[in-house]
Amino acid sequence: MSERFGLFGIRHGAEEHVLCHGASQGISLALHLFTQPGDQVAVEVPTYANVLSAFAGLGLTAAPVAMDDDGADPDALDRVLAKPGVKAFYTIPSFHNPLGTSTSLERRKQILAIAERHGVPVIEDGFELDLRFRGDEIPPLAALDEAGLVVLLFSFSKSLFPGVRVGSLSARGRVLEGLVALKHATDLSDARLLQAGLSRFVRSGGYDRHLARMRKVLRSRHAALDDALAASMPSGTRWTSPDGGYQRWVELPEAVDTRDLLPEAARAGVLFSPGTLFMPDARPSNGLRLTVAAANEDEIARGVAALGEVVKRSGEARRTAGRRPGNHL
């Protein structure tokens, strides 16, 4: 772990990594360390759906932080972290889920300065750190952290396959001590045979060769998705342009709850995640998340063409309903 993290500028020793069963257990451990029932955790809006489920299970509530194209909005974050009930900030600065976007280097420095000023720990979810397929690396928050506030989550589940439930938490000082104690209290051992095999695979160079192939595949699939969205979605549709990872955020041009489109899209052979899943207050959303994890370029083109037809039919049906007699005041 230490050698791989050194590639991202993270100078943690081997003893500063706590192995865990994927990022999900890591999130749970970090939340247990920093919070207790009734507390709030600051999150970007939108944010990872499963972390919202973790909040519900632990009796926590989300403190929403607005985002712009550069990441978490500094003024909004400053206001939220100033609240005494907010005990941590959960963020995905690299290849955000569900947006796919990455926080700029300058914004990362601002985020750390704000967190340090308020003394609020940062849980950095780096679940796809290894999956950049274009552009220059941006140092994780953990590489820029001088105050020891950042806990970095890492997982092999996305870069290899979901069954590899091996991840880590990286931290320093008393935070590290707390995570070690919680890990020992949570389970007595990890999947050591799997960890040993994975370690050998990484040290042999096999993992880096695999990543090279993965990045090529992701680059091609995202390019196909760009082309398909431009060709098939109605005018005014907007989408993000990730530099890594699997996911992409799409916003439709009309005020439609994308949950309402899902049944017809499924019948057409297309699955997506409606935007409301990623909203702390479950508000309706005209956004949706697409992923390229399980579809090749031809399947992407066919799927987006089908999705575009569903969206267009839905829009036409709403406009027709609005023109019917009796619908006007």
Image (tube, rainbow, N blue to C red):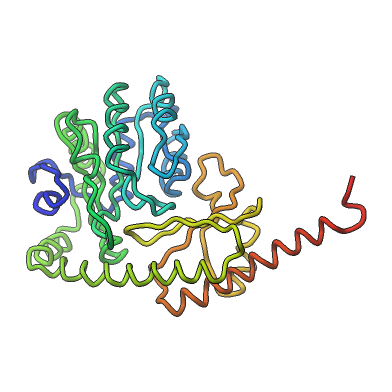
Residue 322: x and y in percent read 82, 55
Residue 203 visible in image: yes
Q: Which residue is found at the position 55% from the left and 56% from the top? A: 274
Q: Which residue is found at the position 27% from the left and 32% from the top? A: 112
Task: Give the left or right position of residue 25, taking residue 259 as reference.
Answer: left
Q: Is residue 286 above or below residue 292?
A: above
Q: Which residue is found at the position 65% from the left and 54% from the top? A: 254
Residue 13: x and y in percent read 8, 43
Q: Is residue 73 above or below residue 320?
A: above
Task: Give the left or right position of residue 57, taking residue 252 as reference.
Answer: left
Task: Give the left or right position of residue 52, taking residue 283 as reference.
Answer: left
Q: In the image as oriented, which residue stretches furthest toward the right?
A: 326
Q: In the image as oriented, which residue stretches furthest toward the bottom?
A: 298
Residue 61 visible in image: no
Q: Quadrant of residue 111?
A: top left
Residue 124: x and y in percent read 29, 42
Question: Which residue occupies the foreground of this view, 178 or 175?
Answer: 175
Q: Which residue is found at the position 32% from the left and 37% from the top? A: 107
The C terminus appears in which quarter of the rendering? top right
Q: How many marks?
A: 0
Q: Is residue 306 above or below residue 149?
A: below
